[in-house]
Image: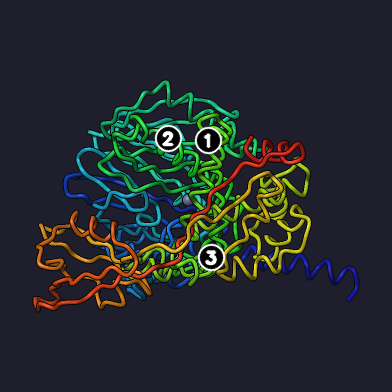
Amino acid sequence: MTHLNRLSSLLLVTLFVILTHPLLAVEIRYTLKMAKPQNHYFQVEMKVEQLSQKTALVKLPVWAPGSYLVREFSKNLNQVKVYSLSGSPLKVNKKTKNAWEIELNGQKGFVLSYEVYAFELSVRTSFLDETHGFVSGPSMFMYLDGQKELGGVLVVQSHPSFKKISTGLAPKTTADKQANQQAYTFDNYDQLIDCPLEIGNQEEFEFTAAGVKHTVAMYGEANYDQELLKKDMAKIVEEETKIVGVNPNKNYVFIVHNVVGGDGGLEHANSTVLSVDRWTYEGNNYINFLNLVAHEYFHLWNVKRIRPFVLGPFDYDQEVYTTLLWVMEGFTSYYDEIILRRCGFYSQDEMLRKVQSAINYVEGSVGSRVQPVAHASFDAWIKAYRPNENSSNTTMTYYSRGLVLAAVFDAMIVTNSKGTKGLDHVMQDLYNTYYVGKNRGFTDDEFKKTTEKFVGRDLTDFFDRYINGSEVIPYNDYLEPLGIEVVDVGGIKPVFGATVADEGGKVIVKTVRSGSSAEEAGISVNDEIIACMQYRVDKSMVDGIMNSAAINDEFELTLSRDKLIRKVTVKISGQKKVSYIFNNKATDVSLPLYNYWLR
Ligand SMILES: [Zn+2]
């Protein structure tokens, strides 16, 4: 092929691409309404123009990023109707549980409308009543299959009683106060649904930290001290920004739901939703709120940008599998503690006790010997997010084991670098190499290699044993260079092995530990414990008897299972109990390392 031929064929290809991809000009326009908040329905309209195909497939995600469970959001979606741009009805066929095919019939666009029932107030679902509306994008907005890269506009027409909208989306123009309407732009579908919206009369306040404007939107009665929150949240932002060295946002929004109980948080690229108990700002609970702030905020780096390959862009049709949630959630759990130390909310010793208790929790759980942390991550969809009565015997939490692994890696790097580097440098490297440099997530192997670079040695054996395997980590090997002697003082302890709950005055068995005295005796979950020897018991008596029992003690228990009475004899056996204590053995060599680690 000559040079000229190549040039003309290149022009032809370019022309062909332009002619066959008129969709590049397509813009999607969503309108969100809430006509009657008291019926809990949002009305959504999706308008797409300049299409050239015969049919269009629209879909709703089955899961929400950051929460690894198939939630089947389309179960709440009703009244799907489609019209041409001029208003004549078009035929729509349901193709799968979350997909609808629109017959365009020569039309160049369509207007799709539907209703979403929103009555589950959590950080990952949508909610609407007379007091406010909360929109979690994956449960609300459909997308054009194969075209998630398209940007567009979202117009929110709020109910007249709602005066404010808090979201990380960029406003398009100034709000039309008369119509109670506000338009926002989005670059692509992933961004649209990564920006939840709080719509109502929430209290908003602002603070600037690390050069970023932060807005805090408070829904619900609560006893917070606004000035204290501004000061403490700013401290967390400043310290976390130092870890990677860059804060990639200009604006960031904290949407806080102050409710009874509270169910945690969900991270987004430039916002987060926190669901907290309305009394969390008082006394000892306040530090838990700061932990949650530190956790979700750190996710703007770790998982939203520093991420495994499959965690963005997302496949919303099904589970996406990664063995690295222990890095995403576990490292974030480590940082939500160590950041509070760096902010001065904890002393060095308090931080050390946090690591000690995390290790005792992890190594003391039966599931830690059954499920490697990499498997716990991969199976989050069917295990961590779908726990049952036997979960503690078969699973371990990648949050806690990941926290422990982060502490161990941090210690290894501090030792290797003689107190000049730590886990922060791994995070920086991952951010710069993969997010900034390659604009993608990393593979398991790329993560391991980056960590090896800072630990200064091959980690294949370490990964095989403690990450892809479930062996006990030899903590002393890694903490002793920092002047911490790890001693197991647990020994053999009497263990009954069943937990019970009071249900309407009945003592009901909730869990039975594998290999325990309770299991050996034939006690099962859901059994009612009626009597011990000849005494009728309540929950506190069962707990009291079992906690004070010695090895080889025997009890006859009267149970009811399926309303049939049975008697069993429990012989209390001894089981190995893990209980590590950390002894401080600081030397001139180890003290600087210790001080760098827990700075
Ligand atoms: Zn998290």
Q: Position of residue 273 (x, y in %)?
A: 40, 43
Residue at screen point 40% across, 37% down? 289
Q: Residue furthest top?
A: 227
Q: Which residue is mark 1?
A: 340
Q: Position of residue 128 (x, y in %)?
A: 25, 46
Q: How many marks?
A: 3
| Above or below for 555 versus 597 | below
Task: Specify the quadrant that holds the N terminus.
Answer: bottom right
Amino acid type, mark 3: Val
Amino acid type, mark 1: Leu
* Of residues 157 and 309, the one drawn nearer to the viewer in this rendering: 309
Q: Position of residue 386 (x, y in %)?
A: 36, 66
Label 3 or label 2, whichever comes before in sequence order: 2
Residue 207 showing in the rendered view: yes
Q: Position of residue 446 (x, y in %)?
A: 70, 62
Label 2 neighbour load within 10 Å: few <14, some 14-19, many 20+: some
- Quarter of the view holding residue 286: top left
Secondary structure at badge 3 equals helix
Q: Which residue is mark 2?
A: 287
Q: Which mark is residue 373?
A: 3
Secondary structure at badge 1 equals helix
Pointer 1 with pointer 2, Cβ within 8 A: yes
Secondary structure at badge 2 equals helix
Label 1 neighbour load within 10 Å: few <14, some 14-19, many 20+: many
Marks 3 and 2, how far apart in space? Answer: 28 Å
